[in-house]
Amino acid sequence: MLRTIKPKNARSKRALKNREPKVEENPKQAIFIRGSSTNQIVNTALSDLCSIKKPYSIMFSKKNAIHPFDDQSSLEFFSQKNDASLFCVGTNSKKRPNNLVFVRMFDYQVLDMIELGIENFKSLHDFKSTKSSIGMKPLFVFNGELFEQREEYKKLKNMLLDFFRDEVAESVNLKGLEYIISVTAEPVANPTDFGKVFFRVYTIQMKKSGTKQPRIELEEMGPSFDFVFRRNRFAGEDVMKEATKIPKELQAKKVKNITHNDVGDKMGRIHMKKQNFDNLQTRKMKALKKKFNKVEENNKEEPSTKKAKTA
């Protein structure tokens, strides 16, 4: 464990205060680490993922004897020292070649981990196309029913969204949408089997369409992965509930008689007094005017006697 640091000047005091818990947390920092044994594929994959995550990423150039599933003390040390909550550890061995381990932290402790194997890897430099700017948030597209059915796929989806979340944007500029990440789950015949997960990155090209809305074309930017599921370790329900707890200041105030449906439309319930339909104003028509009703009533009455004519 790290020793408690007491601030000696205003600068160190501000740095420590920035690490304190907040209602709105800072963007999550990600650290990309090379394991004790790696190869060129793993090193390039870590470098490409780090470049997409910039400016909220740190790349460790030296190798580290780190094994997330066996010993988590090194990750906890790096997390507390660098104020980071996301890790990507790359290793290569005979048993598990071209291996990536995505790790999430909570309160400087390991929350959950997913281990993926790399197949059919293509780097950023293999695609001769335009690249997105640094600091742009990606759009995500998840294709496949498995992301809504299987627990492992749900965790992977949540992990990737959390990994590339960055800053919270209240509004979006159309020109700021520069690239999109597409994650596709291969369908499987057996419910217990795992298929490949295809990770692709495309830049968004806005072309003229003759209207106000531009015509969108996608151009593959890279990197490109075919991921294979390996080991995983997920947090318990109690720990996950504590990690995803929303502060009271950010909780939306409940409004009576207002709900939202699955599409996101707002539905309201209105309470009204009992209406008298006799006085209800309807469309004005000649047949419904009052004078016609009076004429009919007069016709029903008995005819009055006429006075005799005088001579």
Image (tube, helix red, strand yellow):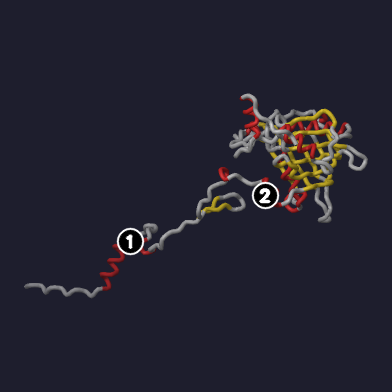
Badge 2 element: helix
Q: Label 1 near label 2: C-beta < 8 Å?
A: no
User: At 72% from the left edge and 45% from the top edge, which residue is drawn?
Assistant: 158
Residue wearing tag 2? 241
Q: Give the amino acid at mark 2.
A: Lys
Residue wearing tag 1? 289
- Please identify the quarter of the rendering in which residue 217 is found: top right
Reply above or below: 246 against 166: below
Q: Residues within 10 Å of mark 1 (few under 14, many from 20)?
A: few
- Please identify the quarter of the rendering in which residue 28 is found: top right
Say whether disc 2 or disc 1 marks the residue closer to the N-terminus.
Answer: 2
User: At 73% from the left edge and 51% from the top edge, which residue is drawn?
Assistant: 236
Q: Nearer the viewer, residue 194 or 301?
A: 194
User: At 67% from the left edge and 47% from the top edge, which residue is drawn?
Assistant: 242
Badge 1 element: loop
Q: Quadrant of the C terminus?
A: bottom left
